[in-house]
């Protein structure tokens, strides 16, 4: 993560230079939170936390970094001379990666010397905003799939449509956290241990004289439950050809795994293809679907009676379309002078060091209470210390553990918040002490 030290906005450096010049480097606390939910979303799934921890615990300017900054002729030499020893030595509290979270409640709380806490803002937002957005979108798609069939699965097909490699890699990881069972991204499989899954392209079918010849060739190479793409020419005839190959595999003691639909009326075609397969005794063969899918389209297909057991979802999951970005921000909430508050309309913040307490009733989460850190409040605290004195206080969890935790936590969220079109809002209450501090600081700073 040392290579990400320069992943910052210029103003983090100019502010730090001004803090240095004015000898202002007291302790400060910042909250990272997301201002509001996109339309139809019921909650966010916090993601990117572990990358953020790695980042703050590995900050270090290289000789090349400092020379570059010197060449810009912006900074005084005495400030640049402090950078070789610049490290993050503070503490960080964060929710666990995979936790469902609400707007305006801290995802991460950073306390350190002002220059240290200030500098990490940009990179933390870069990591957490994107990965949270994709994990949440993926979970919405997964929830839609399972509403039609509790055994339905979603596979990430987004690599070719992601915004270059970094988004493809972090996006694939995020979709897995959000509930996808596999990815087509081989590099993500290798680096993160995500199961990989894929079929073949239409070009493979078109490379042979006939469709059935192509199917036989593919099944010859991959005889153990292959998936055949059946819509290159005529989908129903493709299903018949796949059935022939399926019976030939049976004769070899093998099985056809699935057929994939990638065009047309997927709900109607899935019913027709299912009938063709069943008539040939291939009821075990799964019907998969792809083609610019999202949670809304999957809901609509379910309403039409689609019989689909797996979805390959690409563009709209890896980009979170139509949500281009989420409104994660990083705000000063406390320093040596006490609590800090922003009063700008639509951007008001909650001051002070805070904790989130989540209350559960009969196995379902009902309400979060945002309180000052030293208040005694009923519920499960969501923020836990992850960095102390600039060092990790626990090992990075395995990705499979994070995914399992995420899905277990989502299972406890109200069903109304897991729908594709969310109308209700999860209840977040402000504690007595925090409310008093808000009122006190509002009176103090309103006239400034």
Image (spheres, grey):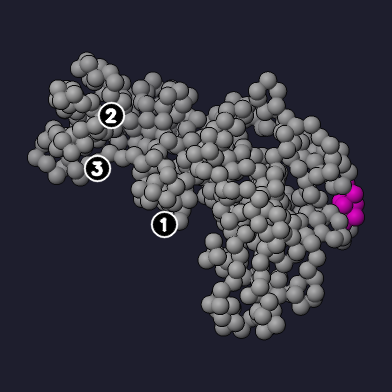
Dot 2 corresponds to which residue? 258
- Secondary-structure class at tag 1: helix
The tag on residue 281 is none
For the point 87% across and 47% down, the residue is: 437
- Of labels 2 and 3, earlier in sequence is 3
Q: Is residue 443 magenta?
A: yes
Q: In this view, does 13 lie to the left or right of 133?
A: right
For the point 22% across and 16% down, the residue is: 281
Whether 197 is drawn above or below 243: the answer is below
Dot 3 corresponds to which residue? 201
Whether 144 is drawn above or below 156: the answer is above
Q: Is residue 164 left or right of residue 89?
A: left
Q: Give the range drawn in magenta.
A: 439-445
For the point 79% across and 49% down, the residue is: 353
Quadrant containing the N terminus is bottom right
The answer to the question of whether label 2 and label 3 lie on touching residues, with beta carbons closer than 8 A, is no
| Few, some or many residues within 10 Å of mark 1 (<14, 14–19, 20+) | few
- Of labels 1 and 2, earlier in sequence is 1
Q: Can residue 170 be seen in this view?
A: yes
Whole-angstrom CA distance, mark 2 to mark 3, is 15 Å
């Amino acid at each position: 993560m040392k290579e990400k030290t320069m992943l910052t906005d210029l103003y983090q450096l100019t502010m730090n230079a001004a803090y240095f010049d004015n000898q202002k480097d007291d302790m400060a606390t910042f909250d990272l939170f997301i201002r509001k939910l996109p339309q139809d979303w019921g909650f966010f799934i916090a993601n990117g936390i572990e990358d953020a921890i790695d980042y703050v615990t590995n900050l270090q300017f290289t000789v090349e970094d400092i020379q570059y900054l010197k060449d810009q002729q912006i900074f005084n030499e005495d400030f640049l001379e402090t950078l070789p020893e610049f490290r993050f030595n503070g503490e960080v509290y964060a929710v666990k990666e995979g936790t469902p979270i609400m707007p305006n409640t801290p995802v991460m709380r950073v306390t350190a010397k002002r220059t240290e806490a200030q500098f990490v803002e940009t990179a933390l937002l870069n990591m957490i905003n994107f990965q949270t957005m994709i994990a949440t979108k993926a979970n919405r798609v997964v929830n839609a799939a399972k509403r039609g069939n509790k055994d339905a699965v979603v596979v990430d097909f987004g690599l070719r449509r992601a915004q270059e490699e970094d988004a493809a890699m972090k996006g694939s990881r995020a979709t897995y956290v959000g509930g996808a069972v596999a990815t087509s991204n081989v590099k993500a499989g290798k680096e993160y241990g995500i199961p990989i899954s894929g079929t073949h392209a239409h070009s493979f079918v078109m490379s042979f004289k006939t469709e059935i010849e192509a199917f036989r060739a593919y099944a010859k190479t991959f005889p153990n439950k292959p998936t055949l793409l059946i819509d290159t020419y005529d989908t129903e005839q493709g299903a018949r050809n796949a059935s022939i190959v399926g019976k030939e595999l049976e004769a070899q003691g093998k099985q056809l795994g699935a057929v994939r639909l990638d065009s047309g009326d997927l709900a109607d075609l899935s019913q027709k293809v299912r009938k063709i397969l069943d008539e040939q005794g291939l009821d075990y063969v799964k019907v998969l679907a792809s083609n610019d899918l999202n949670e809304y389209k999957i809901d609509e297909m379910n309403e039409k009676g689609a019989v689909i057991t797996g979805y390959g979802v690409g563009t709209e999951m890896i980009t979170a379309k139509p949500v281009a970005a989420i409104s994660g921000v990083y705000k000063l909430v406390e320093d040596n002078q006490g609590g800090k508050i922003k009063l700008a309309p639509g951007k008001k913040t909650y001051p002070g060091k805070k904790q989130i307490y989540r209350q559960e009733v009969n196995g379902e989460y009902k309400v979060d209470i945002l309180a000052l850190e030293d208040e005694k409040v009923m519920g499960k605290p969501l923020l836990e210390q992850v960095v102390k004195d600039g060092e990790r206080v626990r090992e990075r969890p395995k990705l499979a553990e994070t995914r399992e935790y995420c899905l277990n936590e989502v299972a406890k969220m109200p069903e109304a918040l897991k729908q594709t079109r969310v109308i209700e809002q999860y209840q977040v209450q402000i504690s007595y002490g925090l409310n008093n501090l808000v009122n006190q600081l509002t009176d103090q700073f309103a006239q400034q």
